[in-house]
Amino acid sequence: MVSGEPGKGPLLNHAIVNPPVDRNLPPDEAGDVFMRVEKETDAGVIVSGAKVVATGSAITNYNFIAHYGLPIKKKEYALICTVPMDSPGIKLFCRPSYTMQADTMGSPFDYPLSSRMDENDTVFVFDKVLVPWENVFLYGDPERVSNFVPQSGFIQRFTFQGCIRLSVKLEFIAGLLLKALEITGSKDFRGVQTRAGEVIGWRNLFRAVADAMARNPDPGPHGTVLPKMDYGLVYRQFMIQGYPRVKEIIEQDVASGLIYLNSHAVDFKTPEVRPYLDKYMRGSNGYDAVDRVKLMKALWDSIGTEFGGRHELYERNYAGNHENVKAEVLFAAEAQGQVDAMKGFADTMLDEYDLDGWTVPDLINPTDINLIMNR
């Protein structure tokens, strides 16, 4: 069972995506890669295989394992469970730590985000891991496991927190950008102002979507409500366009200011170097060199370092590639009857006329003046 220290809750993450290996095969045919139950015992199930991208798993207490993607057909692949991270047989293969890179080559002044906010991402491998029965939520029912994400409220909840996360992130980045435009002396240029307004507009859009998800919810089980799924799906669609566009605007309008920087905070503490930095690194509008460099390094860490690049990739592909994210809007509309309703709406107009003209009583055919129809 999931438990933490007295007075403290456990830290959990999740891994629900299959590795992009043998993508020509359905998940239950890539038998040597995808997570599966190898054996049932009195104590629990023995599990092998892998999940990705287990963000933060190296620093968490438990990992929630589920399925998202193509439907499962075989019993042994149908498993939803929670696994303690110290279970024998669990292996984590991590990408490089941006925090370690920042600590080794820089300082908090140089990498204010990389140095403290990198969650790391891992390939989460099970090598004959025993999952106790009390940690198993679903097993052996391919249909229920395949439908867990669309039917459990998972989509509504993860898109809701994702939309809030993105709007806060854009609000922070917009603040850095607005300060950077002051420092570079370009804040009063008309074109720059229009693009700064565009960045704020993207922030406002996602804030509005989050508000709408909460204030116009979907009905949930037993009298509960869930954030509006339609709006959550459209947030995923437009963040694919919005986040790269914001990054493009920053690179376009802040430009070389993002790299016109000294290498390390220690430079400002070096007497032989400091006078040159104070003179040549200062900004416009009264910003001294330390404040300018501090701000530009923070903005660069937001969008340009490995940490910043990872966040763009994350927003572009949040729980699905760019095509699937958009296709899911269609699939959800089909499942909820909205596609038929939209087509029916179009049909109400199409049914109001034929080759002889209007067929409804509230519209009048122009037979008295029409030159062609009177021939």
Image (cartoon, grey):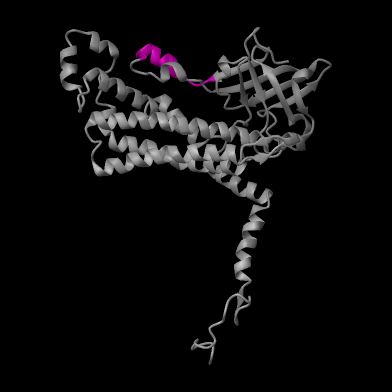
Q: Is residue 163 above or below residue 191?
A: above
Q: Is residue 65 above or below residue 250?
A: above
Q: Is residue 28 above or below residue 131?
A: below
- Residue at x-position 65% and y-position 33%: 154
Which residue is most to the right?
42
Instruction: Pinpoint residue 56: horizontal percent, then vertical percent.
Output: 55, 20
The magenta segment = 94-108
- Residue at x-position 76% and y-position 28%: 138
Which residue is most to the bottom?
375
Q: Which residue is more in the foreground, 24 or 207?
A: 207
Q: Is residue 130 above or below residue 371?
A: above
| 99 on left or right of 232 | left
The stretch drawn in magenta includes residue 100? yes
Instruction: Pinpoint residue 347: horizontal percent, then vertical percent.
Output: 63, 66
Q: Identify the image quadrant of residue 280.
A: top left
| 305 on left or right of 214 | left
Instruction: Pinpoint residue 118: horizontal percent, then vertical percent.
Output: 47, 20
